[in-house]
Structures are given as structure tokens and as C-alpha cells.
């Protein structure tokens, strides 16, 4: 099965919600490396990690029981930015876990960590800045998505490295007074 097909299935036929799953709880997706995941060097291609992360985020939404509520509102997730760090290779046949968790959010963006684990070894770590859009209505504020997931408290503080990255790549929320204006 290709990762694109796996994502389509994870989105269209979401797995059952995990009882008691909360917004800040990790979601675990177990996968196995297939021959189609490999590059010419016979390890998982860097772009395939991003496709696997798409599946992990779809499963995270399903674990929270949000798939139907998002569909009913016409809200859907998109990636605004991502950064990856690779520590070791995954090769064909290896079974691994992708752990997805929310780190926090601002007015615009939900920040997630997605870590690939082979037994107790960290293989790769991705940081994702995700947005939610509404069909026909534009952007959905991240706190509205958190509230839909049953979280009514403020966001936890982002780890310093993630906050610095978000500011550096320009995805962090900035009040209009801080937004760059037209260039003269």
C-alpha cells in the first residue's frame, strides 16, 4: 500500500477514537517500512517521512474523535511549515512507531512534534506548524480547534526551540502592528 493510499484510508475511514484521549496526549501510529518507502540507498526516503507524518496526524485527529466534527464544519488541516531532523535510517521490513503530540498553539497555528521510534531509539523528529482552513470561509483560529477538541485552557508554553523556529520561519502569530507592511 502506498503512503498516499494509507493517508486516504486514514482520512476517509478514520480509526476509532481512543477513550479518554486528550488534546495534549500522544497518539501512536505503528507502521512497517515497505519497499516503496525506500530510495536508491535502500533506506526510507526523506520525503516519505513527511507522508508518514500526514498519516500520523490523520490518526491523531481520529484518536481525539475529531474527524466527523471537522468534516461537519468543513474544517481541514494543512501544513504551514515543517522541519525535520534525522538521526538514523529505517530500512525495509522494520516496524516502527510514529508518536504525534501537540506542543501548543497560538492564534493561527497548532505546533506538533512527530517522532519516529525504532524500539527505544529515536530515528527522526519532525516539528510541524499546522493550520486549519474552512471551506469557503478561510482560516480557523487554532484556539477554536483546541476548543472543539475539548480543550478550554490556554496553550502550554512552546518549547524554546520550537518558538524560535516558528518566529524564524515566519509562521508564528504576530499582531497586525508587528506584521511587516508593504515595502516602499
Image (cartoon, grey):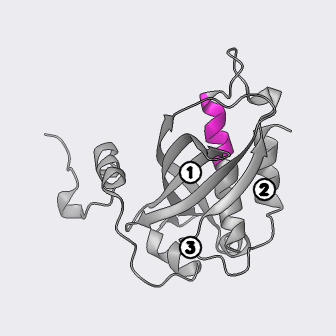
- N-terminal of the pair, mark 3 or mark 1, is 3
Q: Is residue 63 magenta?
A: no
Q: Nearer the viewer, mark 2 or mark 1?
A: 1
Residue 158 place in picture, x, y as percent: 36, 62
Q: Earlier in the sequence, mark 2 or mark 3?
A: 2
Q: Which residue bears the numbered disc 3?
A: 23
- Dividing the picture into quadrants, the one containing residue 73 is bottom right
What distance separates the C-alpha of mark 2 from that of mark 3? 19 Å
Compare residues 170 and 45 and report the one nearer the observer.
Answer: 45
Q: Which mark is residue 114?
A: 1
Q: Is residue 26 above or below residue 21?
A: above
Check the image and report above or below for 41 versus 20. Answer: above
Between 43 and 7, the one lying in front of the other is 43
Residue 143, given in percent of the width and then of the height, sits at 45, 74
Left or right, 15 with reference to 168: right
Q: Which residue is mark 2?
A: 10
Residue at the image point whose x is 65% and y is 50% from the top: 98
Note whether residue 141 is visible: no
Chain part drawn in magenta? 46-53
Amino acid at each position: 500500500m502506498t503512503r498516499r493510499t494509507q493517508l486516504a484510508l486514514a482520512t476517509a475511514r478514520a480509526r476509532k477514537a481512543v477513550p479518554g484521549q486528550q488534546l495534549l496526549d500522544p497518539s501512536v501510529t505503528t507502521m512497517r517500512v515497505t519497499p516503496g518507502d525506500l530510495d536508491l540507498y535502500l533506506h526510507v526516503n526523506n520525503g516519505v517521512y513527511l507522508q508518514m507524518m500526514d498519516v500520523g496526524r490523520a490518526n491523531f485527529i481520529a484518536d481525539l474523535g475529531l474527524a466527523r466534527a471537522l468534516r461537519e464544519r468543513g474544517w481541514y488541516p494543512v501544513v504551514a511549515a515543517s522541519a525535520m531532523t534525522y538521526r538514523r535510517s529505517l530500512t525495509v521490513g522494520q516496524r516502527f512507531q510514529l508518536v504525534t503530540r501537540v506542543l501548543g498553539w497560538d492564534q493561527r497555528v497548532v505546533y506538533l512534534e512527530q517522532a519516529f521510534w525504532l524500539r527505544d531509539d529515536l530515528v527522526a523528529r519532525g516539528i510541524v506548524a499546522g493550520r486549519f482552513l474552512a471551506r469557503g470561509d478561510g482560516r480557523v483560529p487554532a484556539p477554536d480547534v483546541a476548543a472543539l477538541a475539548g480543550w478550554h485552557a490556554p496553550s502550554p508554553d512552546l518549547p524554546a526551540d520550537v518558538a524560535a523556529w516558528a518566529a524564524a520561519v515566519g509562521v508564528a502569530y504576530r499582531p497586525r502592528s508587528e506584521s511587516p507592511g508593504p515595502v516602499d
